[in-house]
Amino acid sequence: MTEPRWLDEQEQRAWRGLMATQESLAAFIDRQLRTRCGLSHADYQVLAHLSESPEGRLRSFELGDRLHWEKSRLSQHLSRMQSRGLVTRERSQADQRGAVITITTTGQELITTAARQHVADARDAVVDQLTQAELRTLIAITDKVRRRLAALGAASGD
């Protein structure tokens, strides 16, 4: 086994800073959504994808792909959301095998309210803290890392 290429001080500071920022931002967003709207961040993601889809509907596998969730996680989460009246599930008319997930009126009302507050939180925590040049740099960095992660996922069979 070969010795790993250890991170130098600057690389370690960047890596740990990225991890800490990711964790803090996720906790902040989740806390704000729960406190203000009674939604988890996961609820918000599901409702956002459905609300942006034609007729507020998506096939279950499409929703899972967009969220990057495993089938079991999606199924369990949708069951909880369905019991709260935020989404409905029905068999696909196209093939009778898959499920179609639809946002309910209650879910649509919640995501409309939550989105207004969510964008204000995103602005307050990140967007308005950066210059236009920093935003362009952030976009370039996140796009580059996501492309690499996609390539690594494809290489590993994910």
Image: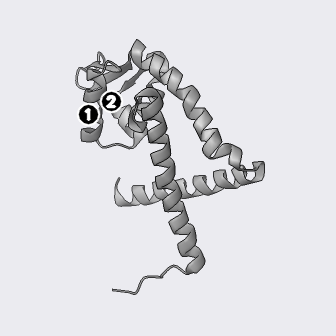
Image marks 2 and 1: residues in contact by CB distance under 8 Å: yes
Please tell me whether residue 16 is drawn above or below residue 74 in the rendered image.
below
Please tell me whether residue 29 is drawn above or below residue 63 in the rendered image.
below
- Residue 119 % position (x, y): 60, 33
Looking at the image, what colour scheme do you see? one colour
Q: Residues within 10 Å of mark 2 (few under 14, many from 20)?
A: many
Q: Amino acid at mark 2?
A: Ser
Is residue 52 something one can see in this rendering?
no
Q: On the image, numbered disc 2 is attached to which residue?
A: 60
Which element type, helix, strand or loop, lies under badge 1? helix
Mark 2 or 1, nearer chain start: 2
Q: Is residue 133 left or right of residue 13?
A: right
**Which quadrant does the N terminus fall into?**
bottom left
Q: On the image, numbered disc 1 is attached to which residue?
A: 75
40, 156: nearer the viewer: 40
Residue lying at the far front in this picture: please name it: 35
Which element type, helix, strand or loop, lies under badge 2? helix
Q: Amino acid at mark 1?
A: Ser
- Residue 100 % position (x, y): 32, 22
